[in-house]
Image: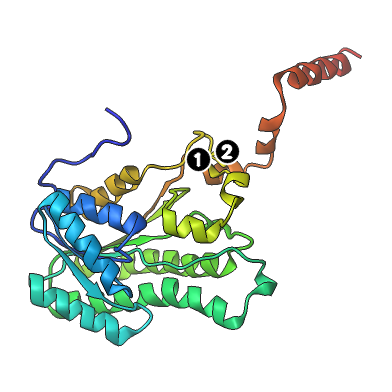
Amino acid sequence: MSYTDKMLRDDALKGKVIVVTGGGSGLGKAMTKYFLELGAQVAITSRDLEKLKTTATELETETGGKCLPVQCDVRHYEEVEHMLQEVLKTFGKVDVLLNNAAGNFISPTERLSANAFDTVIDIVLKGTKNCTLAFGKHWIDSKQTTATILNIVTTYAWTGSAYVVPSATAKAGVLAMTRSLAVEWAKYGIRSNAIAPGPFPTKGAWDRLLPGDLAEKFDMAKKVPLKRVGDHQELANLAAYLVSDFSAYINGDVITIDGGEWLKGAGQFNLLEAIPEELWDQLEMMIKAKKNK
């Protein structure tokens, strides 16, 4: 058994209809593939319809499942409503909303234009709000008895992070929304949870965040106590569990999957890991010498 193995039984999501925003590539694509393998029907959305169609065809061929590509810019509420109607027209219902669409880039905050800041806020926070509100209203108005919202956030949603301030701001808002609606909408049978991933490299997103040779200079694996980055199947396993009925009593939680990365960064003396063994020997001898005086 390995962490790259699939976790749930084959029919774990049979009968469920799942919508994945930002599902055309990267982690969204990885999660969608596993949902299909587990028997779910999945609609994937983004602004790039051609990429969505290519991904949907590829995943249907690989899994034998049904994947519906629907163009949608989550920044616009009317497009989200249209996307929801397209999904309902095809599948007849929706059981799960996975808010995965995101935008991010690294920059000193003072270098950002107001529009650049707004772009990230609009995709991450406003987009998540638009989808959550549209789907929530539908579930409540149609008196659907159970539904699940799963939001992809990040560990710096609660710590903050320099150089990605728009993303940190937006993700913190999404996390607050997750916890708030978990309480407010539970009476309607709607669960709301979040995943906070650490480093899970994807070709597109990481090339934009760390262009050129920056990825080598800032090796994310070195920041993780487990000394590796995440495998996409690990995230897909967790997401599948949280949207399945096996997690029916989990509500309002955010689950971190980062190999201990954020805790390593938070500990005041964690940087002492860089001290070599021979220096520790010297320090120990100095401390003992002081005690004996």
Q: Residue at x 29, y 57 (%)?
A: 29
- Residue 267 on image: x %, y %: 63, 42
- Residue 268 on image: x %, y %: 68, 42
Q: Which residue is mark 1?
A: 260
Amino acid on which disc 2 is placed: Lys
Q: Quadrant of residue 203?
A: bottom left
Amino acid on which disc 1 is placed: Gly
- Callout 2: SS: helix
- Residue 181 on image: x %, y %: 33, 69
Q: Is residue 230 left or right of residue 55?
A: right
Quadrant into which the N terminus falls: top left
Which residue occupies the extreme top position in the image?
292
Residue 42 visible in the shown view: yes
For mark 1, does the 10 Å Cα neighbourhood hold few (<14), some (14 to 19), or many (20 or more) residues?
Answer: some
Q: Which residue is mark 2?
A: 222
Q: Earlier in the sequence, mark 1 or mark 2?
A: 2
Q: Is residue 59 left or right of residue 106?
A: left
How many numbered circles does the render carry?
2
Q: Residue at x 13, y 67 (%)?
A: 145
